[in-house]
Image (cartoon, rainbow, N blue to C red):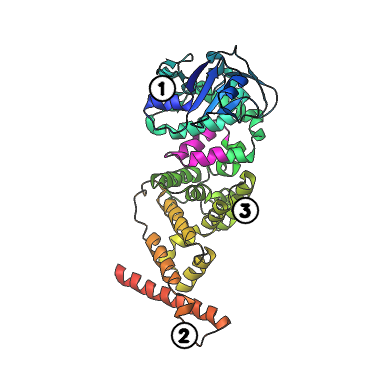
Amino acid sequence: MRVYLVGGAVRDHLLGHPYHEKDYVVVGATPEQLLAQGYQPIGKDFPVFLHPETKEEYALARTERKSGQGYHGFEFYTDTSVTLEEDLIRRDLTINAMAMDEDGNVYDPYKGQQDLTDRILRHVSNAFVEDPLRVLRIARFAARYKSLGFSVASETLALMQQLAESGELQALTPERVWKETSRALMEDHADEYFETLRRCGALKVLFPELDALYGIPQRPEYHPEIDSGIHTMMSLQQACKANYSLDVRFAVLVHDLGKALTPADELPRHIMHEERGVKSVTEVCDRLKVPTNTKQLAIAVCKEHLKCHQALSLKPGTLWRLLQRLDVLRRPERVEAYVQACECDSRGRLGLEDREYPQSQYVLDAMEVVRGIKAQDLPPDISGPDIGEMLIQRRIQALEELKARQIIATV
């Protein structure tokens, strides 16, 4: 029985990139042998075990054969005769098809180390096309390693395109698409995930609402980059640069979906695009089974982002109603996330990436002002429905005072 560290841990070790998860493959062993040593079985389709002490995963070396559609459509074969090379060849990329023994010796039958040196994401074999999930995984790796100069090999991109055209991507479950996408969104260059999917034709299959933004013009005086798809990616870059949360990044990603629905005779203006976009954002979230809080913020940003841009000129009553819709009294964190997403939209424009966005602090100040006015601060003779009415009056009055201070500060 021989044990090897495999996959991402070996890749990142050789790159000097931080890693936390370790996976192992066991060659020449039977399930009974591992059970006798205290390993705990967890695999359903093929034997995978947890180490009795470290709880790290140990999988028996295996081969696989395509037997159906999708990434679950495989038959697996494990036996003591399966070699390390046979196990590694089923993996997606050469840089993920390396192994390391306990002495630190690297086994690299498919030239993964050379591709690490050349900064190439290259498939191991043509069996790549048997698993549609690999399209998303390679796009995610492209996002993860963009800062290191990695790019997808042309022949691998061609296989990804083949998968996108085959109909196999439709076999991916919504949960799996969201899992890969949410992980990609948290990379420093999340935009590269979507750009890679677009280059291979997978974006129009999995995210047609996003793909439809490309080629849609915007008014150049507001959007020097002109193209709505490019603007969306530039806005997402801003969210990554600021290291904002997944919820914010996703909201930024879908904030302008309504621009793809603008009638052609209205272009390049996008009147009411924020209202039009709510239906598209809702459909994307429902299709991918996006978590509720993530969905709610995305819809709010889509519908209300222009209001944030206009915040400094809004009437106090209008600003109060905006804060109400954002659930300011119960969910101040949503207001903060909303402001962050709107700031990314404002800066996601060619040549305007570093411009000031005073609306951000103004809305946050307004949030603190209205949250600071509570029922216990009212006169004791106020009761019943009058309490709510007076709270609204006092909050709007406080916003009027905030606006007056803001005007004085800018004079």
> Tag 3: residue type?
Lys
Seen at 40% across and 50% down, the residue is 347
Residue 190 painted magenta: yes
Look at mark 3 in the image and give the residue it sits on: 279
Mark whose residue sits in front, 1 or 3? 1
Question: x%, y% of residue 322?
Answer: 50, 66
Q: For numbered disc 2, what is the local secondary structure? A: loop
Q: Which mark is residue 379?
A: 2
Seen at 46% across and 51% down, the residue is 219
In the displayed structure, 390 sits above or below 9; it is below
Q: Which mark is residue 116?
A: 1
Residue 12 painted magenta: no
**Marks 1/2: CA–CA distance:** 71 Å
Mark whose residue sits in front, 1 or 2? 2
Question: x%, y% of residue 212?
Answer: 57, 43
Question: x%, y% of residue 134?
Answer: 56, 29
Region rendered in magenta: 179-202
Q: For numbered disc 3, what is the local secondary structure? A: helix
Badge 3 local density, few (<14 within 10 Å), some, or many (20+)? some
